Amino acid sequence: MTYLYYKTSSTGTVKPNETTVKHWKHLAAKKNWRITQLPNGFYQTECLNPDKEHEWQDVTRRETIEGAETAINGSVTHFASKLEATKGPKVVKTFE
C-alpha cells in the first residue's frame, strides 16, 4: 500500500513556472531580506518585493532580533531547497 501511495503522489509533480522560480531565487538570497524594529518593540522581517523596486513586504514578527534572524535563515534555506528540487531527483546510490 505504501508503494502505491508514493507512486501516485510523486508522479504528478508539476514543475514551477519561470516567474515562480525567479521569486524563489530572490527569496533564497539573504541580501533581499531585512529586519526592522516596530514601535511595540517587536522585530519584523521584511523581504524586498521582486516585482516592485524599493518596496518591502512584511513577512513575520518576532520578539527578539535573534528570532527574526532565525526566521530569515529558515526562509532562505526553505527557498534554496525548493530551487534545488526543481533540478529533479538526485541520484544517491546506484547498483551494479
Image (spheres, helix red, strand yellow):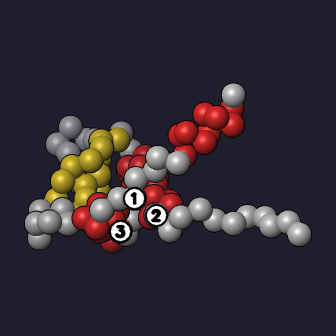
Q: Decide: marks 2, 1 in contact (CB < 8 A)?
A: yes
Tag shown at residue 15: 1
Q: Position of residue 82 (x, y in %)?
A: 45, 58
Residue 6 or 85: which is nearer the viewer?
6
Q: Position of residue 13 (x, y in %)?
A: 46, 50
What residue is rendered at 53% in x and 40% in y? 9
Mark 1 to mark 3 CA distance (whole Å):
15 Å
Q: Is residue 7 left or right of residue 52?
A: right
Mark 2 to mark 1 CA distance (whole Å):
7 Å
What residue does disc 3 label? Answer: 25
Quadrant, the C terminus: bottom right
Q: Earlier in the sequence, mark 1 or mark 3?
A: 1
Q: Specify the quadrant of the image occupied by residue 40.
A: top left
Tag shown at residue 86: 2
What residue is rendered at 29% in x and 52% in y? 45
Q: Amino acid at mark 1?
A: Lys
